[in-house]
Image (spheres, grey):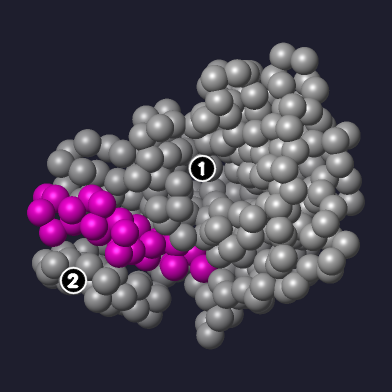
């Protein structure tokens, strides 16, 4: 079996930490949109007949062109029938009108050392690609693009692919998760790395949290005293736009529009203090379960908080 529902941590050795963390969150009882993981083995089956071509392509100093060639190669290559069947079984386990978030969860080999994304030592935040608003008919294509992102320009450069004899042993698993349309989203650090006092910090905005992660929007910054659970400081962000994602398709691979927000939305905070404290409480509960300060992405829809990703905070980030 090349897929596994991410609702517990049994037998997740063949997947990356993004998959594992979602499974742990669900097992611990946090509100996580339904998700499945696609194994490293699925990627291995797919990439096996392409390895010699990939190896030839990366023998260059022009990693930008190399990554584009590999992306095209992977996009145009068929997925093995048994792997495709397992992915299609996952898709039909959701309602037909579901849109998906399809996210990469990698493990790279550099000079024989396994570097795992979202681990206690490495974050690799933003290293690989994710695709949102993916309809059921396009999930397989989005998965292939996640596989291709193992060889994106940044990855080839950071891991010195041309001179790294073990790079081609790297692996990519993939998360297929139900997408929740966010009224508000937040990126939260359960321990503010810039402050010496015990503060939790979050940046919030209207719409998808990718607006914050990609730097397209300056959100509201809210800090909360971890001990007293009292709002410490609030700074209103411009929030001039919100991200609205197009439907993923063969011609549109994850593009989005910046939709102007109203004057009222810009001058008001995207979350009130009550909601911010609710979010903070969940964040500290997650930190306690994981035993380490967390970098958390979440969305709020109809006043309900959904956790879509968590990783250990680390200062060792590419």
Q: Residue 219 location, x and y as percent?
A: 68, 52
Viewer-proximal residue among 187 and 170 = 187
- The residue at the point 27 percent across, 71 percent down is 64
Tell me: 213 left or right of 105: right
Q: Residue 30 location, x and y as percent?
A: 73, 33
Q: Residue 170 location, x and y as percent?
A: 28, 49
Tell me, yes or no, whether the highlighted magenta stretch contains residue 152: yes
Viewer-proximal residue among 256 and 9 = 256
130 shown above or below 285: below
Residue farthest along the bottom direction in this orientation: 251
Q: How many marks?
A: 2
The residue wearing badge 2 is 62
**Quarter of the image with the C terminus in it:** top left
Q: Is residue 246 visible?
A: yes
Region of the chain picked out in magenta, as a range: 142-165
Element carrying mark 2: loop
The residue wearing badge 1 is 18
């Amino acid at each position: 079996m090349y897929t596994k529902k991410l609702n517990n941590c049994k037998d997740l050795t063949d997947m990356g930490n993004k998959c594992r963390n979602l499974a742990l969150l669900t097992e611990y009882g946090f509100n996580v949109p339904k998700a499945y993981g696609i194994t490293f083995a699925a990627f291995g089956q797919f990439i096996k007949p392409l390895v010699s071509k990939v190896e030839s392509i990366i023998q260059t100093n022009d990693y930008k062109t190399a990554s584009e060639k590999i992306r095209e190669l992977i996009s145009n290559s068929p997925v093995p029938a048994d792997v495709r069947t397992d992915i299609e079984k996952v898709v039909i386990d959701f309602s037909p009108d579901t849109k998906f978030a399809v996210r990469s969860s990698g493990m790279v080999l550099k000079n024989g050392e396994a570097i795992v994304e979202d681990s206690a030592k490495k974050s690799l935040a933003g290293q690989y690609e994710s695709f949102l608003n993916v309809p059921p008919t396009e999930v397989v294509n989005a998965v292939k693009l996640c596989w291709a992102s193992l060889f994106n320009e940044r990855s080839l450069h950071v891991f010195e692919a041309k001179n790294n004899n073990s790079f081609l042993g790297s692996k990519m698993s993939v998360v297929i998760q139900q997408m929740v349309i966010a009224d508000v989203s937040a990126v939260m650090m359960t321990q503010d790395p810039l402050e010496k006092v015990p503060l939790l910090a979050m940046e919030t905005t209207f719409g998808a949290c990718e607006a914050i992660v990609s730097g397209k929007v300056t959100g509201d910054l809210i800090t909360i005293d971890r001990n007293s659970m009292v709002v410490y400081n609030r700074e209103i962000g411009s929030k001039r736009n919100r991200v609205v994602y197009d439907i993923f398709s063969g011609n549109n691979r994850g593009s989005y529009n910046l939709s102007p927000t109203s004057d009222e939305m810009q001058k008001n905070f995207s979350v009130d203090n009550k909601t911010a404290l609710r979010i903070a409480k969940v964040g500290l509960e997650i930190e306690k379960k994981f035993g380490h300060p967390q970098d958390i992405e979440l969305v709020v829809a109809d006043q309900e908080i959904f956790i879509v990703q968590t990783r250990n905070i680390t200062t060792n980030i590419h």
